Amino acid sequence: MESNNLLHSTFQTLVETKHAHGILYHILGLGELSRRISAIAAQHYNRDSPQAPAFFHAFVQSYYLEGDHKPRIPLVHNAIAFYAQSTAPQASSQVAHTYSSDSGQRWHIIDVETNDLSLIVPLRVYVPYRSCAPGRSALVLDNIRPLPFWIVRSGGLGVPLASNDLVSLRNQDWRFTNIDGRMRSTVMVKIEWPGYPRWQSQIRMRLNNLSGESYTFKRLVRQVLAKIRKFIAEHMNVVSEEPHWAVGEAGGGRITAHDLVLLGIIEVSRGAVMPILKLRDDFVFADSIPTPAAPITTTMVPPFDPQGAFNNPIPAFPSGADVPDIDGLDQLAYADLFGDVSLDSEMQALLDHYFPLPDAGLATNASFEGY
């Protein structure tokens, strides 16, 4: 038992190392992603090979590499890929969702790296019977497709939520069936957006006119886009418990359909899927917008009014005296003219307080401008 636990831990360490910056690792968590990768690898593992866990671990590790390096997938440059054997059991049902590397080999894209995980919407993953029947939950999860279905077009990964341009969608005609090959008539889209109650809506995979798009991957992608837009429209005026991820109208940092890109779709239960969503690169969250600073107001100082402030009469010339021509006086005469005007001690003290003489310690070139 201890040996199996150690090997299980070693397998998870391998997954954690390979997917440290992966989108699915960020969304699903280590345990669920490890389970899915193990299920994908088991489809390719030769039943005649040694069944010891250590051999399986080495096999999985080797399938991440093309020779001595990671495979390079032209359409998805940051793909975390896993080798896809064309002769593997169930390969016929998976071949549509494989991609060619530069060398022409076929690969599953089991995750995609990103340098900014903060733009990935952290939708919670729906787990069937999570709280009431863990054993039944494991049974259901073992019977869903472990592979993610990436939205890949000629321009690369993802389609904007506000767009319906699926002309160049890869795998668009692939029939989205159950894992046993039976046709799906309906699919439930489950969204557990942070800050909002769980939300779901049903997709009809069959069109009334029985066009070629019925039951296809293209039909699934088109309808998932529509359901996410519907979720946003229904929650525009709903208070979010996590304002960082609040949806609503444009402006103020709330998330709108124009801000989102659908990267992929993953199956979370038999007949249920969830989207993988990313915000546009230049999106600014509401709680990242700086609060406008209060406007700076200038304190208004009333004009100096000696008579009002000090209740002291303004010096005046004697009644009947001529007002001298001040411009014609020199400095000494000007001083003599007003020399007999004296201030009482209270008045002088106030003037000395509000209009002190310059400090003798200041440099001779000191400027008082602005004071």
Image (cartoon, grey):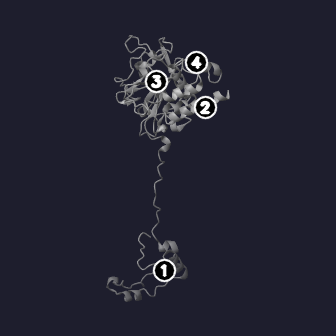
Element type at mark 2: helix
| First in residue order: circle 1 vs circle 4 | 4
| First in residue order: circle 4 vs circle 2 | 2
| First in residue order: circle 2 vs circle 1 | 2
Rendered position, 112 above or below 348:
above
Q: Nearer the viewer, mark 3 or mark 4?
A: 4
| First in residue order: circle 3 vs circle 4 | 4
Residue ID for mark 1 = 361
Residue 92's x, y, as percent?
A: 44, 15
List the single residue furthest toward the right: 1
Residues 195 and 151: in front is 151
Element type at mark 3: helix
Q: Is residue 126 left or right of residue 301?
A: right
Residue 49's x, y, as percent?
A: 54, 20
Residue ID for mark 4 = 140
Residue 304's x, y, as percent?
A: 46, 71
**Residue drawn at x 50%, y 20% as measured from the top left:** 44
Q: Are marks 3 and 4 in contact (CB under 8 Å)?
A: no
**Residue drawn at x 56%, y 26% as measured from the top left:** 55
| First in residue order: circle 3 vs circle 2 | 2
**Residue drawn at x 53%, y 21% as measured from the top left:** 42
Residues 174 and 54: in front is 54
- Residue type marked 1: Gly
Give the Cα separation between the discs numbered 1 and 3: 77 Å
Give the Cα separation between the discs numbered 2 and 1: 76 Å
Q: Within the image, what quadrant is residue 218 found in?
A: top left
Give the Cα separation between the discs numbered 1 and 4: 88 Å
| First in residue order: circle 1 vs circle 3 | 3
Give the Cα separation between the discs numbered 3 and 4: 24 Å
Residue ID for mark 3 = 227
Element type at mark 4: helix
- The answer, for residue 189, to whether it is visible in the render is no
